[in-house]
Amino acid sequence: MYIFMTLKYILITVKVVLVTKMSKWNYTGKNVSVEKAEESLKAVKSACFGCDTHSPDCSIAKAAGDIAAMTEEERL
């Protein structure tokens, strides 16, 4: 019984931590959920024009890179 209750507590605690984990958007300092960041990353990637070569000056590629970096930090 004690082991079951301990495991239940651990599972509940892990769920709370996963739900409340937030990333910080570098440009404004706003906290953003990982889910919201992933949604934004999909939207930015869908705006890509599909050029044959990518330039470091491309604002779409830069935004996608910044968002991807933010979500990667949370996975570590």
Image: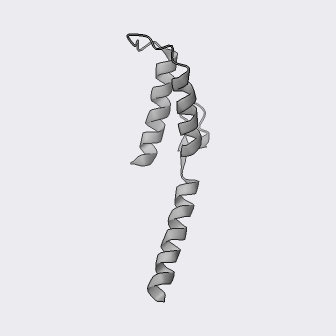
Q: In this figure, what is the number of numbered marks? A: 0
The quadrant holding residue 33 is top right
User: At which x and y percent is residue 34?
Assistant: 54, 44
Q: Position of residue 66 (x, y in %)?
A: 48, 29
Q: Give the residue displayed 50% in from the left and 69% down from the top.
A: 11
Image-based side of 29 in relation to 51, left or right: right
Which of the two residues, 21 or 35, is positioned nearer the viewer here?
35
**Residue 23 location, x and y as percent?**
53, 44
Residue drawn at x 57%, y 33% as measured from the top left: 40
Which colour scheme appears in the figure? one colour
**Residue under the point 40% across and 13% down:** 54
Considering depth in this image, is 39 or 66 the residue closer to the camera? 39
Along the line of sight, the residue nearer the viewer: 23 or 4: 4
| Residue 51, above or below 66 | above
Residue 16 in the image: x percent, y percent?
57, 62
Q: Which residue is nearer to you in this view: 24 or 41?
A: 41
